[in-house]
Amino acid sequence: MVNFLQKKYILVFGLQKVPCRLMWKHRNKYDFSSEDESSEDQEFEIFKLQNNFPAWNIDGSAYDLPPEGFTWITFAEHITGKKRGRCSFSDCYEKSQVGGHLWIRQIGCCIAPICSKCNYHKNEKRMQGGNSNVRKGTTVIKIGLTEEMTSATRRYSSG
């Protein structure tokens, strides 16, 4: 399940990094196989943003499933110990309802609490180039990219 090694913050380039090791078996929406040798352990890092950071939704993330027994938002609440509040996008004041897959500049692919409107795949403001930022103080969980994310028509960017 979840294994916290330390609960100490480290300041890294405007980020507070919470050192911990989180392990779980990756699940894909269309992977009907039982847990086997092909299922790899996933590791995560938790960051608390000390500034606003450019961010956008990642296409192809609908196939990425959270650990069994969780939704992405309940997983984030469980791991970080924080309850959902308002949407993580700096210009949105709606209540967060989902754990969205975001590309956050200088970090990469993360789960962040966002509202359903901002998570909508046709919301151009939340696409790369939409000039969106995740607000200062947001706690995010860095996760790995899936095959579907890297091969989506509108791809993520390492920028």
Image (cartoon, rainbow, N blue to C red):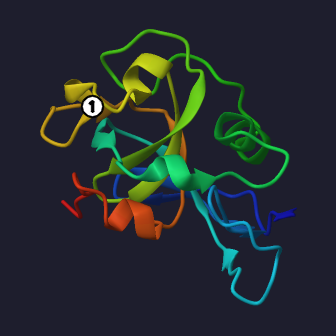
Tell me, yes or no, if residue 47 can be seen here.
Answer: no
- What type is the residue that disc 1 sits on? Arg
Relative horizontal placement of residue 145, taking residue 32 as reference (left or right): left
Helix, strand or loop at mark 1? helix
Q: Look at the picture and state if 95 lies above or below 64.
A: above
Q: Quadrant of residue 28?
A: bottom right
Q: Look at the picture and state if 56 lies above or below 124.
A: below
Q: Look at the picture and state if 111 lies above or below 26.
A: above
Tell me, yes or no, if residue 104 can be seen here.
Answer: yes
Q: Look at the picture and state if 121 lies above or below 13.
A: above
Residue at image x 19%, y 43%? Answer: 128
x then y, percent, for residue 3 = 83, 66
Q: Residues within 10 Å of mark 1 (few under 14, many from 20)?
A: many
Q: Nearer the viewer, residue 12 or 157?
A: 157
Where is the C terminus found, in terms of image quarters? bottom left
Residue at image x 34%, y 49%? Answer: 104
Q: How many tags in the picture?
A: 1
* Residue positioned most to the left: 129
Q: Quadrant of residue 38?
A: bottom right
Q: Which residue is mark 1?
A: 126
Relative horizontal placement of residue 117, taking residue 79 as reference (left or right): left
Residue at image x 35%, y 48%? Answer: 59
Where is the N terminus found, in terms of image quarters? bottom right
x then y, percent, for residue 138 = 49, 34
Residue at image x 68%, y 68%? Answer: 26
Q: Nearer the viewer, residue 99 or 87?
A: 99
Q: Nearer the viewer, residue 40 or 4?
A: 40
